[in-house]
Image (cartoon, grey):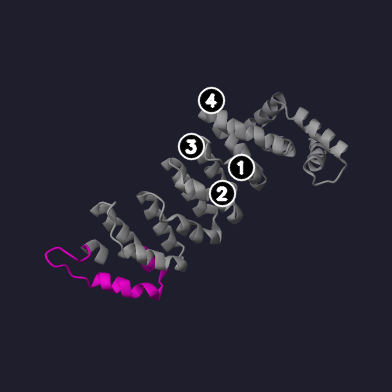
């Protein structure tokens, strides 16, 4: 416990938050590197695992005092842990770091990272992120792995705040069918009025790449979202759909869409 304020001072000098000359800064960095040895980190993690409130708090405080050094080691652990149990334990520690972990996570999100690592980063950002960090999740909505896309979408919903609407709308034309439906539903849920023109355009278009069932599901979802948003701009199009009639099964909208 007595070490915590000392480590914190070295961290502030090392990061530049506390201005000292270059020689003192380098000494501080070396001290932190030596203290943040694998042996010491394992001791601290063991203290956290004991899960006694006082020990847990003290161990976390020292770990956080290691600054960027501990984040690099933690992120490497998430990437390279052999067992899911070990990976989950490290993720929980990163969550305890809170917003302080976001800059390091930002640097670690690259297109070449393994899918499971990106999914875990999306998961963490959904718990420690904020409106400002929501943009980090946008590229993950277009990732080739569905598990990454799903986690990124959930995290944007949790932390995106006022950015959710514009961020989700910006990827709507590019995402796969399942995520498209989820985004449309979210735009309705948050009553994102700015999405109405694009939703109306999507509603009027017939897609050659979608099956009939997919087309109907999307039309239903769009109508529901427009109703939830409540913009009068959508009323003429919705009225036209509700009153549409087919001739020999051609030209009209399916009953479930009209409903």
Q: Which residue is mark 3?
A: 115
Please name the residue shown 58% across and 37% down the image: 91
In the visual, does 206 lie left or right of 19?
left
Please name the residue shown 40% across and 71% down the image: 230
Q: Which residue is mark 4?
A: 82
Q: Which residue is mark 1?
A: 105
**Disc 2 element:** helix
Ranked by sequence position, the earlier of labels 2 and 3 is: 3
Q: In the depicted view, which residue is nearer to us: 230 or 163?
A: 163
> Does residue 245 belong to the magenta stretch?
yes
In the visual, does 33 lie left or right of 145?
right
- Give how far across and how far down residue 93 sits, in percent: 62, 37
Kindly report which numbered mark, 4 or 3, lies closer to the viewer in this rendering: 3
Tag count in the figure?
4
Q: Give me the C-alpha separation between circle 4 and circle 3.
A: 15 Å
Please name the residue shown 26% across and 69% down the image: 241
User: What are the residue bounds of the magenta stretch?
Assistant: 225-254
**Disc 3 element:** helix
Q: Which residue is mark 2?
A: 136
């Amino acid at each position: 416990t007595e070490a915590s304020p000392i480590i914190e001072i070295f961290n502030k000098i090392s990061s530049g938050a506390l201005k000292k000359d270059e020689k003192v800064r380098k000494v501080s960095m070396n001290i932190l590197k030596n203290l943040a040895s694998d042996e010491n980190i394992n001791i601290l993690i063991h203290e956290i695992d004991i899960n006694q409130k006082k020990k847990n708090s003290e161990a976390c405080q020292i770990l956080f005092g290691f600054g960027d050094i501990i984040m690099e080691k933690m992120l490497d652990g998430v990437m390279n842990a052999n067992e899911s149990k070990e990976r989950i334990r490290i993720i929980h520690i990163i969550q305890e770091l809170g917003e302080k972990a976001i800059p390091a996570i930002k640097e670690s999100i690259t297109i070449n990272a393994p899918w499971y690592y990106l999914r875990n980063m999306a998961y963490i950002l959904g718990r420690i992120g904020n409106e400002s960090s929501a943009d980090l999740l946008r590229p993950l909505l277009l990732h080739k792995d569905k598990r990454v896309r799903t986690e990124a979408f959930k995290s944007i919903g949790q932390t995106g705040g006022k950015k959710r609407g514009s961020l989700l709308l910006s990827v709507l034309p590019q995402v796969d069918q399942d995520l498209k439906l989820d985004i449309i539903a979210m735009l309705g849920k948050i009553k994102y009025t700015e999405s109405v023109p694009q939703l109306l355009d999507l509603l009027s278009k017939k897609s050659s790449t979608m099956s009939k069932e997919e087309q109907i599901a999307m039309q239903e979802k769009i109508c529901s979202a427009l109703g939830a948003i409540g913009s009068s701009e959508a009323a003429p199009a919705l009225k036209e759909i509700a009153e549409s009639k087919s001739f020999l099964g051609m030209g009209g909208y399916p009953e479930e869409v009209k409903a």
